[in-house]
């Protein structure tokens, strides 16, 4: 599964305003709500579900990447967004390698569809094995530029 099959183009964030993990998750869910990919009335509950997942263990997998995710009953299809961290300090996700995060891919999927959820997680990890992807994303200034990089990997 390619990331552009579940990432919501109008929810991509070429510059994340948040400076910490919790605010980053809130900002990204708000972007999904603003795009219409999730209902705004469910945004707080989706954020809470993602926070619960983070309590099980960090989704900061290393190499500058975090993949916060959750399944939620309010969504009827797999959706996600990507945010690029611009400030040099990155965002602390308590990553396994102890390094800050510079790219965050947030995924929300239907409660009853674990298969697509797992395939989406795998597609993100696989894409970011390409050591050139993160620098190319960080060079983007607009959501359209992000989409072009993600579509032409």
Image: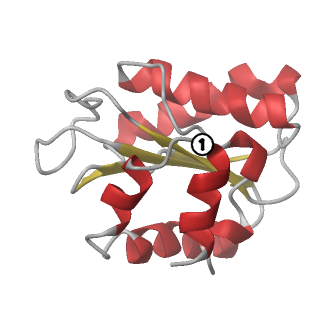
User: Taking 36 as reference, is 149 left or right?
Assistant: left
> Where does residue 137 sit, x and y in percent of width and height?
43, 54
Q: Which residue is mark 1?
A: 142
Please identify the residue farthest to the left as the structure is shown.
Answer: 98
Picture coordinates of residue 126, whole percent (x, y): 40, 77
- Image point 48% across, 28% down: which residue? 16
Q: Nearer the viewer, residue 51 or 2?
A: 2
Residue drawn at (66%, 76%) of the image: 115
- Identify the residue shown where x is 30% and y is 75%: 129
Please report the residue visible at 44 percent of the width from the left and 51 percent of the height from the top: 67
Residue 46 in view (yes/no) = no
Lateral position of residue 82 relative to residue 132, left or right: right
Would you identify the image quadrant in which residue 61 lies?
Answer: bottom left
Quarter of the figure with the N terminus: bottom right
Residue 108 drawn above or below residue 84: below
**Between residues 144 and 74, which one lies in front from this camera angle?**
144
Task: Decide: is 121 above or below 140.
Answer: below
């Amino acid at each position: 599964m390619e990331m552009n099959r579940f990432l919501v183009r109008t929810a991509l964030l070429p510059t994340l305003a948040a400076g910490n993990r919790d605010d980053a998750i809130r900002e990204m869910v708000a972007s999904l709500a603003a795009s219409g990919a999730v209902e705004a009335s469910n945004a707080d509950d989706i954020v809470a579900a993602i926070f619960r997942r983070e309590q099980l263990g960090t989704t900061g997998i290393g190499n500058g990447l975090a993949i916060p995710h959750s399944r939620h009953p309010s969504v009827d299809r797999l959706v996600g967004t990507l945010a690029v961290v611009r400030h040099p300090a990155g965002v602390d996700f308590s990553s396994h390698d102890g390094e800050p995060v510079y790219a965050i891919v947030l995924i929300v999927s239907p409660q009853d569809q674990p298969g697509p959820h797992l395939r989406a997680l795998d597609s993100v990890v696989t894409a970011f094995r390409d050591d050139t992807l993160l620098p190319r994303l960080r060079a983007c200034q607009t959501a359209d530029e992000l989409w072009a990089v993600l579509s032409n990997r």
